[in-house]
Amino acid sequence: MRISTNTIYQSGISKISQLQSEQVKLQQQISTGRRIASPSDDPVGSARALEVSHAQSINAKFADTRQTAQLKLNTIESSLTSLTSMMISTQSSLVSAGNATLSDQERQFIATELSGTLEAMIGLANTKDAAGNYLYAGFKTDTKPFVANASGASYAGDSNSQLLQVDTQRQMAINVTGDNVFQAGGNDIFATISNLVTLLNTPLTAANQAAFSAGISTGIGSMQTGLDNVLNVRAAVGSKLNELDTLDTAGADRDLQYSKSLSELQDLDYASALSDLSKNQTIMEAAQKSFVATTSLSLFDFI
Amino acid sequence: MASNILSIGKSALAAAQVGISTTGHNIANASTPGYSRQVVVQAAAQSQNFGYGYVGQGTEIAGVNRVYNDILAAQAVRSQATSAGINAYQTQMSTINDMLSNPAAGLNPAMSDFFGSMQDLSANPSDTATRQSMLSYTQSLANRFQSTNNRLNEIRDGVNAQLTSSIGLVNVYAKQIASLNDTIEKAVSANGNTPNDLLDQRDQLVLELSKQIKTTVVPQGQGSYNIYIGNGMPLVVGKDTFSLVPAASPTDPSRVEVAYQTSGKTTVLGANSLPGGAIGGLLQFRAESLDTIQNQIGQLATVLAETFNAQHSQGLDKNGNPGGPLFSIPNPTVNANSNNSGPTTIPSNATPAVVSSKVEDARALTASDYRLEYDGTNYKITRLSDLSAFPPFSSLPQTVDGVSFKIDSGSMLAGDNFLIKPTQNAAALFKVAITNPDKLAVGGPALTSSEGAGNTGTGTITALVAGSGYAASPLSAPFTMTYNTLPSAGLSFTPSQTVVVTSGAISTTYAPGDLVPYTNGATITIANSSFTLSGTLSDGDNFTVAPNTSGAPGDNRNGLLLAGLQSEKTLNGGKNSYSDAFGQLVNGVGNKTRELNVLSTSEAQVLEQITAAVQSESGVNLDEEATNLIRYQQAYQAAGKMMQIASQLFDVLLQLGN
């Protein structure tokens, strides 16, 4: 076949420039560490990588939300722990108050102690979380949920549960409303203690002896019911914290899997890229040398 | 006899000279684009009969021809057009591909951040800082939509500019070819010889022309070319030319189309009639890819805005007021065809139709454009992405694919048509409608319903929805519906108000105070809210719908529902979530770019092969020319020698007399 001089140059240049563009591409992959530089490099892979990184970011967001949930539930748990010990000490005070050998003055000491406990409990019921929201007020987080009055305290919050999306399919209530903790099932702890204070402040006579004993035993019973309820609430909070831990572990697992898939989809296989690069270099050198060798031959050199 | 030898020598000398200058011309033009090597056609001169036989009279030059294969040349022209078309398409597509190549800059991260901040807000509904941050992420989502769309608009402007300059080139080439036609024709008719270098120039112009537009050459008359473009429109006929002009699309003034001009008449050519060449590639890119991609992004913006707004309206803001729209999104663009009837057309139309369009159901929205046309009896709506026509409608308004079509004023005459683009400009005008973070409606619901305590039937209220206008005029007080069987069965409303009952696709309006018949499962719309009442009602049953006035800072119920939209399948009739839709878009762009890369490489190879074949035949080989140079040099020397011998022979004769 007859070859024109133009063709010799043209084909030499086009081959070399093709090799150069491959070289640049490999170099770009090696310097970024990514196999896919733009969607056209692997349309399916890049769409898949988008899906995976999207899922990963949602997963990470759930982990954030779980932290918020944990913080709130832990705050509730610690305030309920204090409440539990207060209630237990109240009970033991009540048992000793029931002792008929105590003088009126000694009962008044206990009454003073109990009214102190009452104030402390109301204070506890009005605990705020880290963000300054009342813990036991339902949705009315800016309203003091319990206001002390003559017969204990009245509830000013609502009975709504604040739910959080802690995982794809799980919404978890992360609050406990005050009426469910302190006044569950009509058994009002504050009213009970307030009544007991009044009872203990009343001097004991033969006429009210029976009423006194009945009052103390009702009080002990009511405190026990209240304590059982608080323990139930604590158990529920505890199991939620437990569940959050489990979800966290599963979330972390998923995160790891997502990272692994992303790496498989996007990351460069360095060994093969580097070997491609050196292969390309060899071909390039050969192409350049043969181009120079071919073009340096000219009949004009001999005329 | 000697004079004859001398003249034979002279003819050989002259032929060798022509040979050397032609070789020199070839060497000089070895790298001239489009140059075909020239060869000297030498023939023996007419010999003379001397009785004893014919004696040769030397040589003569029959002609100087160019080595040219018109079949290969035609192939090169065709391949050039195809290759240039794919290259133009591929170059444009690559810019979009590159735009999407940075995973951190796409729409997905902005959407993830936006929904992430929504979840944060659900966890801390009363926190002002979280509200502010949610609003900032909302703003940056809007910015991302706008900037993505701006980039696409820049590409669109680039296509317009390139089409205009390509059209200019086509016209320039056409004029040059026509003038060469004229010169060549004159030269050929003057002496019968072809002006080789002019032919090369003209062939090169044809090749350049085919880079811009698909070109067909038909040789005509005495060496003249007729040039046809696209699907056979004449561009050059002899020394006359027709021209292409850039024209605004009749249905979209911002869009440059290619128009063909003949005797004062301008016809806009569609992408289909102009395949190949840079012009064909650009038109194809715009029609197939750019429009689709921009529409898909607009669809995503519209659906996100509409679904989010609808859910946002169901909630209560920090101050306990119903949520207004969070995003503002434009109505579909409606472009009247510039050839539609008007007061000055024949037939005239004193009140040309003004058509409006609205997205009624974002979830049913497609990424297509629509054409609305009137044939004198019926209105026809065509979805342009797949050219599927909906059954003709005898009247408007109508809703198709979630988009309503309505004549606001005036009327259409037969042949009038409108182009409706529900999504193309949506991303450009995707904006955040609120600036006060307290207005984020995280609490809720805005409306509540209850059943009368003494109800004995099984009736229930479901799907209680605050409409888009609810925030502007919310319910000020609860209203109650009571069902009575006597004197006649139906629902009465207290306080009385206008009621619309929708059952199937039929809506019936009842004036305030009218008894409303009960239809099980019908949707009842009142003021700015709607709900479904279903079940069996008994006499005296009553239901109350009330505005929720117990706004509380810790309420996050609507926030959870808003955040939940992220994974809901809201697009394309419930098939895709927002991020699915974006993933599909990226996948589509990647696939198309890859396809074009492969095509462009293979077309470039085809072109290279054809060019090599053309070059193999017509190209200059310097070694060959060097050989020719030596050959003609030797021929020249030999001829000289011969003339020297003739002279010596003559000398012999002259010396005879001495």
Image (spheres, grey):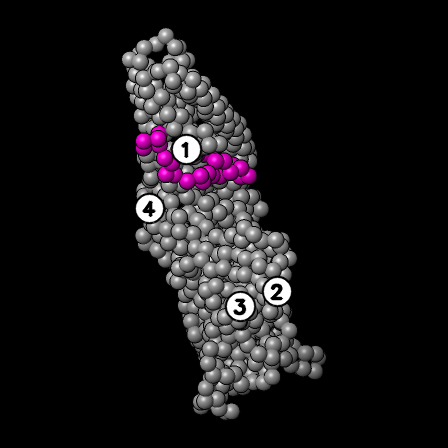
- Whether pointer 2 and pointer 1 mark residues with C-beta atoms closer than 8 Å, the reply is no
Query: How many residues crowd around disc 2 within 10 Å: few (fewer than 14), some, or many (20 or more)?
Result: few
- Which of the two residues, B119 or B244, is positioned nearer the viewer here? B119
Picture quarter with the N terminus of chain B: bottom right
Residue B75 x/y as whole percent: 61, 66
Mark 4 — residue? B132
Res. B145 image quadrant? bottom left
Amino acid type, callout 4: Gln
Kindly report which numbered mark, 3 or 4, lies closer to the viewer in this rendering: 3
Mark 1 — residue? A178
State the extent of the magenta-drawn residues as a range.
Answer: A149-176
Kindly report which numbered mark, 2 or 1, lies closer to the viewer in this rendering: 2
In the rendered structure, the answer to whether residue B121 lies left or right of residue B394 reads left
Amino acid type, callout 2: Thr
Mark 3 — residue? B500
Comes first in the chain, label 3 or label 2? 2
Residue A209 x/y as whole percent: 40, 16
Query: How many residues crowd around disc 3 within 10 Å: few (fewer than 14), some, or many (20 or more)?
Result: some
Query: How many residues crowd around disc 1 within 10 Å: few (fewer than 14), some, or many (20 or more)?
Result: many
- Which of the two residues, B21 or B48, is positioned nearer the viewer here? B21
